Image (cartoon, grey):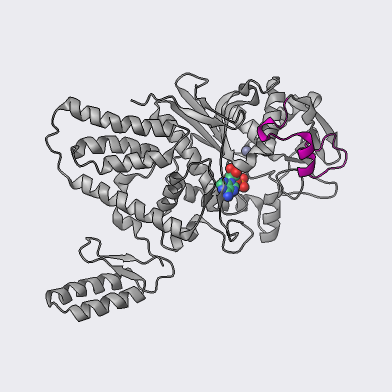
Amino acid sequence: MTDAPLKLFNSLTRSLEVFEPIHPGEARVYTCGPTVYNYPHIGNMRAYVFADVLGRTMTWKGLKLTHVINITDVGHLTDDADAGEDKMEKMAAEKAQSIWDIAEHYKQAYWADVRALNIRQPAQWTVATDYVPQMIEFAKGIAEKHCYELESGLYFDVSTVADYGRLARANTEEGEGRIEAVEGKRNAADFAIWRKTPPGESRQMEWDSPWGRGAPGWHLECSVMSGEVLGFPFDIHTGGIDHREIHHPNEIAQNQAHCCTNGLDDPRNSGARIWMHNNFLVERSGKMSKSSGEFLRLQLLIDKGYHPLAYRLMCLQAHYRSELEFSWDGLGAALTRLKRMVMAWERLLQTPPKDAGSPTAIEQILSGHNDRFDGAISEDLNTAVALTVFEELLAAKKISSDYRLELLRKFDAVLGFGFDGLTRADLRIRPKAATIGEEQVEQAIAFRKELRAQQNYPALDRQRDELAAAGIEVMDGDPLGWEWKLA
Ligand code: AMP
Ligand code: ZN
């Protein structure tokens, strides 16, 4: 049974709400995707692991999921408000490459991370530049009542919709502090929905519009793509917590204008019923910032010998609404935990089923595990508790292996590790800096067997020390035989 009420934290009301699909039996979810001007860092990927768990939970609940993630390849400025340059144009100029090539390269890199983290493919990836005509139509529809033109573009007047900024809990005074002034703006929080290319300049990406040649604003993109594909109002809109402050309040204002609805006392007037935000992954030394040289990409973790799913586990160990501090020790601990799970799973696959005993007794025990898992995941996606329920069932030796596997596979479909396709050996990734190759290690381990047969213990000890110096840990008695030493 998966019938615990699904409670989700709605940032708009700042409260837990029972999820009730707008379209019975369905869940329609939109996730703000990456701006593909650089590699994603692992903090960015936390946002997609979170959205993935949300989607998998909808599937667990028996709902038909339609998930959309966008790819922003135009319009996102270096500042979330209206200041700065277009991130894509800036990177293209720095690298002297076409924006289209930059976008393609980083989109592929992002997708590689998505695959490595077992993030399921959404029903649709919407790419911003594919929706420019629809963006112009949307803007035309709201321009007269809600917008005004300045030399630099078409601006949205936030005073024309009720409850502007409620999602951010921002009042006007705060708003004035946080947004850089553009001359002529009626309200500090007003934002560009179309930015004109300045006279005498040209951009790699620009389109004709009733307000001149230029490019759409970043907030407009998400309103248009979510509404086009999912239809307003849809069920859930997700993003990182930074989006709660500017990007999503602005999307909401546009949606209100477009749908001709007003106040936000009914959350559906915002365009979505529930707005969900993951908290940040933080790192003390500033390696999360893309401007620092060696920033924390998933590939860096892999180069250092960590399986990417150890990072997925690290995310799931914390609640998505809590800040999570990254550390290599923490990642190492997650990898060890993942290894234990994989080893237990491998043992379970090899354990023959036994006479199960009374079917009703077994069903009762299993439904206890099932209900605790369902209860945890339904409580605003409490993956930390769900993981412990998973591990308890994995270790519940009294239950016949076939029964355990059947339920564990369902749990795994929510947690998203794919244990059936994972072996302990997969978790042993060669660190890029390793000075010794796998073949050499295998030879040394084979030689070790000879030494043991000769009972040459001094030589065995010496060999262990030599291998340790080369970054290899010998695990006598373990079928795997050896392991890279991550230190
Ligand atoms: P961007 O590519 O900058 O638009 O960001 C992609 C997603 O990552 C957005 O949902 C951001 O809110 C989210 N995000 C950015 N930094 C972090 C972080 N350190 N931890 C978690 N999520 C983040
Ligand atoms: Zn967005």
* Magenta region includes residue 388: no
> Horizontally, is 89 left or right of 472 in the view?
right
* Magenta region includes residue 183: yes
The x and y percentages for residue 380 are 48, 33
Q: Is residue 189 above or below residue 475?
A: above
User: Looking at this view, is 103 or 408 the one in front?
Assistant: 408
Q: Is residue 344 above or below residue 176?
A: below
Would you say residue 468 is visible in this rendering? yes
Would you say residue 133 is visible in this rendering? no
The x and y percentages for residue 349 are 21, 45
User: Looking at this view, is 119 or 276 the one in front?
Assistant: 276
* Quarter that holds the C terminus: bottom left
Which residue range is magenta in the image?
163-189
Q: Which quarter of the rendered image does ligand 2 occupy?
A: top right
Q: Residue at x 44, y 63 (%)?
A: 304
Snapshot quadrant of residue 254: top right
Q: Residue at x 49, y 26 (%)?
A: 27
The x and y percentages for residue 446 are 20, 71
> Horizontally, is 164 left or right of 359 in the view?
right
For the stretch drawn in magenta, what is the main secondary structure? loop
The x and y percentages for residue 133 are 68, 33
Q: Is residue 226 above or below residue 89?
A: above
> Horizontally, is 134 left or right of 108 in the view?
right
* Quarter that holds the N terminus: top left
Q: Residue at x 22, y 49 (%)?
A: 347
Q: Residue at x 43, y 67 (%)?
A: 432
Name the outermost residue toward the right: 184
